Amino acid sequence: MIRLKKSKGERRRTAAQIEKTKAAVLGATGTEAKKETIWKSLRKRKKETLTQKFGAFAWKSLHGGYKVGTYWKHIDEDRLKCQPCNADTESMEHIMHECRVSGQETVWKIAKEAWALTGIQWPEVTFDLILGIGTVEIKGRRGKMRDGRTRLFQIIITESAYLIWLLRCEWRISREQNTAKIHTVQEITARWRKAVTRRLRLDWALTSKLSFGKKALRAAEVKRTWTGLSDDRNFGTLRKDFTGEGVLVDNAIQRRPPGRNR
Ligand SMILES: [Zn+2]
């Protein structure tokens, strides 16, 4: 009986989250996403834009499967809250968009700076939208889907959201919730760059027809994905990229000016 009741509750939670995600996608893009398309975008991961790790994260989140916030109500009041923020509930929304220990503020700042290089407006990104990101399309003036920019947006959002989740868990677990050990801006910046550069390299690797045949990504589309973020001369030659010569979004990230603390 208890198990039955629980699964019913879970189903209700999942249905509610899907509805919220659908509304977020509609609000951001003006296009309605079907429930099935949202689920499928996490499983099939079209054009290798969403990683398997992000897919699993969003899948579990849509099911309300993470033990955060209200899960701890009546079990452990300490875990229910986010103490450093003085927040009554450490919800996923809190972690992604409000928390001062999850690194979210820095992550989103860097993400917005990188996206600004495309000259396209940054839509309001909420946790609900993040879960439906696989169905979010970036459109041009005439309403035509822009494949490269869509891929880039999805890559930036998924890598950023997943990094925030990782940072939160690291701080809570490995760093034992020590407020003196909150990830620094430098640390977070380095992590973000590493994650996105990895995706850039992976993208180019995936264009290999030799290795992937029909499943290979089209080089032109990959170029359209990263153009503006990576200096043009770095495209086409993966080798150069591997040497790490000023590759990604160098101009997107404000370097700390030299100062006394260096
Ligand atoms: Zn917090």
Image: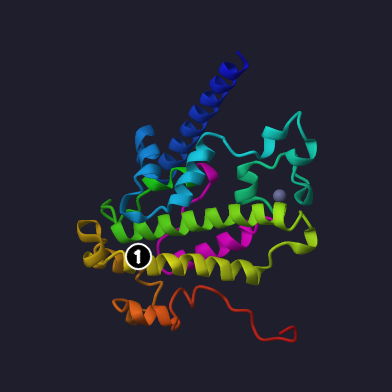
The residue labelled by disc 1 is 203
Furthest residue toward top = 1
Residue 210 x %, y %: 22, 67
Q: Is residue 212 above or below residue 248?
A: above
**What quarter of the picture does the N terminus occupy?**
top right
Q: Against 180, is 256 above or below? A: below
Residue at left offset 57%, top offset 63%: 109
- Span highlighted in magenta in the image: 100-128
- Badge 1: few (under 14), some or many (20 or more) residues near its Cα, within 10 Å? many
Left or right? Give the position of 35 relative to 92: left
**Residue at left offset 44%, top offset 43%:** 132
Q: Position of residue 147 (x, y in %)?
A: 29, 57
Q: Secondary structure at mark 1?
A: helix
Q: Could you tell whether 258 is left or right of 154 in the image? A: right
Task: State the image quarter where residue 185 is shown.
Answer: bottom right
Check if residue 118 falls in the magenta segment.
Answer: yes
Point out the residue furthest to the front here: 211
The answer to which of 42 and 151 lies nearer the viewer is: 42
Q: Is residue 116 visible?
A: no
Q: Residue at x 64, y 48 (%)?
A: 95
Query: Which image quadrant for residue 72?
Result: top right
Identify the residue shown where x is 30% and y is 69%. 223
**Left or right side of 109 for 225:** left
Q: Quadrant of the C terminus?
A: bottom right
- Tell whether 158 sits left or right of 135: right
Q: Is residue 186 magenta?
A: no
